Image (cartoon, rainbow, N blue to C red):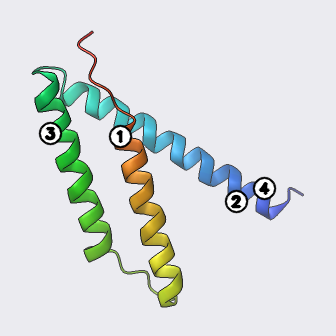
Amino acid sequence: MPDPANELQAINTAWQIAMQEILRMVVRDIYKTGDEGIFKSHIKRIEEAAVDSIYSGLMLRGTDEWTETLVKEKASNFVTTLLTSFTYDRA
């Protein structure tokens, strides 16, 4: 039987990779046209809206305030990390 902590880490890592790849495809397809400035402004707008949504709309049932704050912080960090990893590539 696998170690539950290792299994949870594997699930979290797999989820992050899957979401990153989906987001990478969406961003690439949506912002293929235009220039670098437009691309960067769209990415920044998406990042700001996502982080705002996480902090204003995310409510975790059955968790304490500390856990909810931690999840919101981690989710916001994931958003920023993912979106700032995209670079403009005209190819």
In the displayed image of the protein, which residue is found farthest to the right?
1
Dot 2 corresponds to which residue?
8
Q: Earlier in the sequence, mark 1 or mark 2?
A: 2
Q: Earlier in the sequence, mark 3 or mark 1?
A: 3
Label for residue 33? none
Name the amino acid, label 4: Asn
Q: Tell me the quarter of the picture where residue 40 sits.
A: top left
Name the amino acid, label 1: Thr
Number of residues whose C-alpha sits closer than 10 Å to that of mark 1, classed few (under 14), some (14–19) or many (20 or more): few
Would you say the residues marked 2 and 3 are in contact, meaning their CB atoms lie under 8 Å apart? Answer: no
Name the element at disc 2.
helix
Dot 4 corresponds to which residue?
6
Name the amino acid, label 3: Ser
Q: Earlier in the sequence, mark 3 or mark 4?
A: 4
The location of residue 68, given as percent across then percent down, is 46, 80
Indicate which label's residue lies in the foreground, 3 or 4. Answer: 3
Front in this rendered view, residue 18 or 84:
84
Name the element at disc 1.
helix
Residue at horizontal 36%, vertical 32%? 24
Name the amino acid, label 2: Leu
Quadrant, the N terminus: bottom right
